[in-house]
């Protein structure tokens, strides 16, 4: 697997010669690419080998050199439950969904229950725009089969691999669950927002509780999924309406604990990554980029797009998703 | 070899809160969902065991996870 920042012309050459790729960059660049075995999504934020940066004149390209074939396609919202129908046996699938779209919220809430979703590694991200352009430009995804951009639905790249290839998809979450009893929450109802939460056996007005307790909303709520720590990030707190909005849905019946505070995000990623990262696919969250002040900072050896949500089977927040392809032991 | 559906490990892993940190990410996320569904509708246990066995059967990397159940 190879990660590179390329010009449009360089990326187009690779596509034309048949490389299997996922690309990230400005919509104006992605729209110039020829048809081929690729999908793309919009962002202008990246972690490069030189550190976090805003890049508008080049594309971040990951080439899957071991791929023996690939099928790009766009799925409209109504067909999202059919994601797994395109899985190539023994391969993996990359996915990109535009932020703020119906597909974004539908995948977040219902994706875990789609037929066969877990039948092979599924990795990707939620596409975005520059933060100054939220509300004026729509995040986009691009389907290499047609070269067309879409602001709704999902694009998928179903990748075939040779026999014996092994895909290792995992997450690097730099946050740990805190253990204060008054920072443990459950929610009577699921969704991207909540008015009520249960804390230490008592139901509370969640927005008022956050405000009165002075809770740091840059810290995610962390659930433990049988040993996998999964974050839900707080988007906004409206004390007047009592509504707390999230970047991913909370689920009823799941216990969420406010994360412990961090020192340096960059050091936390470097410590978590160890010597890993180079030669792997990865994407990291815009909230880590912002809150961790990652501009100019590295995240171990990982490079990749900075995104409005990460996908490793399910929608994730404030998390680095990583994927490696190796020969089976 | 994937254990038969009557093997007690299936019920145990779906009706406990055991930590599976050493299992693959897919296994952890899927079991977390299946546990929630079994907890809210215990009568679905058999169907959820079937879903988990199907997943293991389709993912060679997950076969080793059964030993951790």
Image (cartoon, coloured by chain):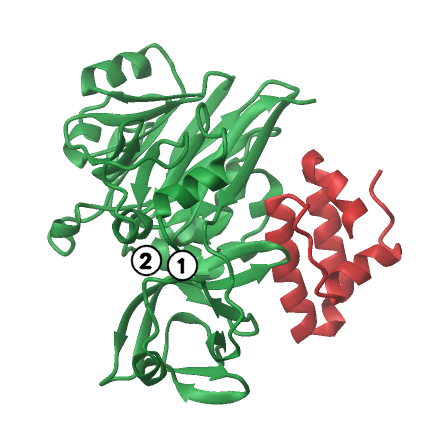
Chain colours: A green, B red
Residue A123 visible to the viewer:
no
* Looking at the image, residue A311 lies above or below residue A157: below
Q: CA distance from mark 2 to mark 1?
A: 6 Å
Which residue matches tag 1?
Answer: A106
Badge 2 density bin: few <14, some 14–19, many ≥20, Cα 10 Å: some
**Near-viewer residue (A208 or B49):** A208
Chain letter belonging to callout 2: A
* Looking at the image, residue A224 lies above or below residue B1: below
When asked about the image quadrant of residue A41, the answer is top left
Chain letter belonging to callout 1: A
Q: Residue drawn at (68%, 72%), measured in percent from left and top?
A: B39
Q: Position of residue A245 (x, y in %)?
A: 32, 70
Q: Position of residue A114 (x, y in %)?
A: 54, 53
Q: Residue drawn at (74%, 62%), measured in percent from left and top?
A: B14
* Looking at the image, residue A59 lies above or below residue A26: above
Residue A310 visible to the viewer:
yes
**Near-viewer residue (A50 or A56):** A50
Q: Secondary structure at mark 2?
A: helix
Q: Secondary structure at mark 1?
A: helix
Q: Position of residue A177 (x, y in %)?
A: 51, 62
- Tag 2 near tag 1, CB within 8 Å: yes
Q: Is residue B31 left or right of residue A268?
A: right
Q: Residue drawn at (23%, 23%), measured in percent from left and top?
A: A33
Indicate the quadrant containing the N terminus of chain B: top left, top right, bottom left or bottom right.
Answer: top right
Q: How many numbered discs, if any?
A: 2
Which residue matches tag 2?
Answer: A102
The dot on residue B33 is none
Q: Are marks 2 and 1 on the same chain?
A: yes
């Amino acid at each position: 697997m190879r990660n590179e920042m390329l010009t449009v012309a360089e990326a187009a050459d690779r596509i034309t010669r048949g490389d299997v790729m996922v690309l990230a960059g400005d919509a104006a660049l992605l729209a110039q690419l020829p048809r081929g075995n690729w999908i793309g999504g919009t962002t202008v934020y990246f972690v490069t080998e030189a550190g976090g940066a805003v890049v508008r004149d080049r594309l971040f390209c990951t080439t899957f050199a071991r791929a023996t074939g690939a099928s790009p396609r766009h799925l409209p919202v109504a067909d999202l439950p059919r994601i797994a129908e395109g899985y190539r046996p023994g391969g993996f699938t990359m996915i990109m969904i535009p932020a703020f779209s119906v597909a974004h919220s539908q995948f977040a809430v219902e994706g875990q229950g789609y037929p066969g979703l877990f039948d092979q590694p599924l990795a990707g991200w939620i596409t975005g725009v520059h933060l100054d352009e939220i509300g004026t430009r729509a995040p986009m995804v691009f389907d290499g089969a047609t070269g067309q951009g879409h602001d709704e639905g999902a694009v998928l790249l179903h990748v075939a691999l040779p026999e014996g290839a092994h895909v290792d998809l995992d997450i690097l979450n730099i946050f740990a669950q805190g253990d204060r009893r008054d920072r443990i929450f459950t929610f009577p109802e699921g969704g991207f927002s909540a008015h009520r939460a249960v804390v230490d056996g008592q139901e509370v007005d969640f927005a008022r509780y956050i405000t009165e307790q002075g809770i740091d909303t840059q810290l995610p709520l962390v659930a433990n999924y049988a040993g996998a720590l999964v974050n839900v990030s707080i988007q906004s707190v409206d004390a007047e309406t009592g509504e707390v909005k999230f970047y991913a849905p909370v689920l009823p019946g799941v216990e969420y604990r406010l994360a412990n505070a961090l020192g340096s995000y960059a050091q936390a990623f470097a410590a978590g990554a160890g010597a890993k990262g180079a030669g792997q696919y990865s994407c990291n969250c815009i909230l880590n980029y912002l809150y961790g002040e990652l501009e100019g900072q590295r995240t171990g050896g990982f490079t990749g797009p900075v995104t409005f949500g990460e996908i490793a089977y399910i929608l994730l927040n404030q998390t680095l998703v990583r994927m490696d392809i190796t020969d089976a032991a | 070899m994937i254990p038969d559906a009557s093997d007690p490990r299936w019920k145990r892993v779906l009706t406990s809160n055991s930590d599976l940190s050493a299992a693959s990410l897919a296994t952890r996320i899927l079991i977390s969902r299946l546990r929630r569904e079994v907890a809210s509708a215990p009568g679905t246990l058999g169907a959820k065991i079937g879903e988990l066995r199907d997943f293991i059967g389709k993912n060679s990397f997950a076969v080793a996870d059964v030993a951790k159940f």
